Image (cartoon, rainbow, N blue to C red):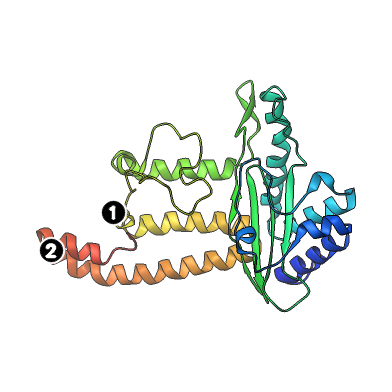
Amino acid sequence: MTTGTVSEQMRFAAVGLMRGLDDEQRAQAALPFADEAARRWLEYRPSRRPGVCLGLLSLNARKAAHRLLATALSDRAYAQAMAIIALEEVLDRQEGWQFGRHSSDYWVSVFGEPAADEPWSWRFEGHHLSVSMTLRGEDVSPAPVFLGANPARVSYAGLAVSRPLAPEEDLAHALIEELGASGRAVAVVADEAPPDIRSGTRSRARQAIEPLGIAAASLGPRGVLRLGRRYCERHAALLPGPGRRFANRVRQYGRRRQSRAHRVAPAARRLRGGHTRQALRRGSLAS
């Protein structure tokens, strides 16, 4: 099913997946929506996880799992996801075939009953790829969604043979450049990236991250809106249905904050010294 709303496509694909599994596989993949621990699971590292492994499925069932994943992603993002999966074989070779990585080590789960009216969700997850969608009626909540890549780049003669997350990496570098030297001094945490995400799979990092980052207010309304617009465009391109709705909410928020900033800034210019800085701080777009 390639027509209909995003929620209808997801429901159709999830039901088709469940029908393509045998009884044992269905028992592993079909989990209760009330199972908070399994449903809120996030693991981007290679590890056993809730659900059924694609490597154990028939060709038709594996294709059904890919069709479910495709309902959540744009054409471009789905291509990125497939490239990330394929990199497991490249990484295994780079590591001397020591850890048994394989491109079938990805898992799929469905929480609740897709055909019912109650809330339900699904997840497709493996090394450096985690896509979770929660649905209630026609509403789709796309969180969490994680795409990574290892190796991030494979090159030959100075040219990239594989670089799945090039658009995101280039956007990040462009944003850093726009900050300028003074902005980078308070926005860049370290010259070299840490070996893993600071927070891991937790919602918060165990240790405080310093510096905290650059305040949006210091960028000015135009700078904030430019960065926000780039972020919205990227997010909408990744998740076609729910991503566009999220991007629209961010844009509306930005317009409201911009209007407020324009009302405050003229009054602030009439003030002097610390009063001016305080007034501008009150009228900032974010902090």
Please name the residue shown 86% across and 54% down the image.
61
The kind of residue tagged 1 is Ser
Residue 87, which numbered label? none
| Residue in front for this viewpoint, 250 or 159 | 250
Q: Is residue 27 above or below residue 148?
A: below
Residue 33 location (% of width, % of height): 67, 68
Q: Quadrant of the N terminus?
A: bottom right
Q: Quadrant of residue 122?
A: bottom right
Q: CA distance from mark 2 to mark 1?
A: 16 Å
Q: For the residue carrying disc 1, how many other residues have a C-alpha within 10 Å: few (<14), some (14-19), or many (20+)?
A: some
| Residue in front for this viewpoint, 143 or 155 | 143
Residue 156 location (% of width, % of height): 65, 23
Circle 1 — which element? helix
Q: Quadrant of residue 148?
A: top right
Q: Is residue 99 above or below residue 244?
A: above
Q: Seen from this angle, which residue lies furthest left?
A: 273
Q: Is residue 246 above or below residue 53?
A: below
Q: How many marks?
A: 2
Q: Seen from this angle, which residue lies furthest bottom?
A: 117
Residue 48 location (% of width, % of height): 69, 45
Please name the residue shown 41% across and 66% down the image.
254
Residue carrying label 2: 275
Circle 2 — which element? helix
Residue carrying label 1: 218
The kind of residue tagged 2 is His
Please name the residue shown 30% across and 67% down the image.
261
- Upstream in the sequence, badge 2 or badge 1? 1
Q: Quadrant of the C terminus?
A: bottom left
Q: For the residue carrying disc 2, how many other residues have a C-alpha within 10 Å: few (<14), some (14-19), or many (20+)?
A: few
Query: Are discs 2 and 1 less than 8 Å apart at CB?
Result: no
Please name the residue shown 13% across and 67% down the image.
270
Residue 255 location (% of width, % of height): 41, 69
